[in-house]
């Protein structure tokens, strides 16, 4: 079960990255080009929110129930903090990704609540940019796309 959920989690991370880039391109183009806020802009943020929520759910299942890394870390937390890879998955990764989820949702909500179209794009661009930064910092780049393939 662990390997299957981890494989899905690894694939969904790339879906999240593609969707955040699409949402960012639309947001910056709308902000800098002073374009109207379209239904497609709203949907880009909504699909991003759905994908990142799915990723969060998969990650929490791994973190709480299935991961041997976090299980080991919580058996001896002090010792685990001395091992960079264990510390990354036990503390850093989840912190960065929770921040990314919050930033995506804040950006979606604030952009919908803005009155002016340019303000909608600006808010989406700023918050989704913050989300992208923390995703890039907190992503385990050494993990293969699918477990067992690299």
Image (cartoon, rainbow, N blue to C red):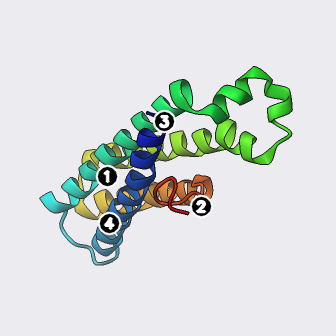
Q: Quadrant of residue 134?
A: bottom right
**Residue designated by label 3:** 2
Residue 141's tag is: 2
Q: Left or right of 137: which side holds 86? A: right
Work out whether residue 87 can be spotted: yes
Q: Quadrant of the C terminus?
A: bottom right
Residue 120 pos. (x, y %): 29, 57
> Circles 3 and 1: CB distance less than 8 Å?
no
Q: Quadrant of residue 40?
A: bottom left
Quote the CA–CA distance across marks 3 and 1: 25 Å
**Residue designated by label 1:** 48
- Between disc 2 and disc 3, whose residue precedes? 3
Q: Left or right of 78: which side holds 144? A: left
Residue 104 pos. (x, y %): 40, 48
Residue 78 pos. (x, y %): 85, 28
- Between disc 4 and disc 2, whose residue precedes? 4
Quote the CA–CA distance across marks 2 and 3: 19 Å
> Circles 2 and 1: CB distance less than 8 Å?
no
Quote the CA–CA distance across marks 4 and 2: 26 Å
- SS category of the residue bearing label 2: loop
Marker count (numbered)? 4
Q: Nearer the viewer, mark 2 or mark 3?
A: 3
- Between disc 3 and disc 4, whose residue precedes? 3
């Amino acid at each position: 079960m662990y390997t299957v959920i981890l494989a899905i989690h690894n694939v969904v991370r790339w879906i999240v990255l593609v969707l955040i880039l699409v949402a960012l391109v639309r947001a910056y183009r709308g902000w800098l080009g002073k374009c109207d806020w379209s239904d497609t802009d709203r949907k880009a943020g909504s699909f991003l929110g759905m994908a990142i929520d799915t990723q969060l759910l998969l990650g929490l299942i791994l973190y709480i129930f299935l991961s041997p890394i976090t299980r080991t870390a919580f058996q001896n937390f002090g010792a685990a903090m001395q091992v960079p890879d264990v510390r990354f998955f036990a503390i850093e990764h989840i912190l960065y990704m929770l921040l990314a989820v919050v930033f995506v949702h804040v950006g979606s909500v604030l952009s919908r609540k803005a009155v002016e179209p340019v303000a909608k794009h600006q808010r989406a661009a700023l918050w989704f940019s913050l989300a992208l930064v923390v995703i890039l910092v907190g992503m385990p780049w050494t993990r293969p796309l699918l477990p067992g393939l690299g």
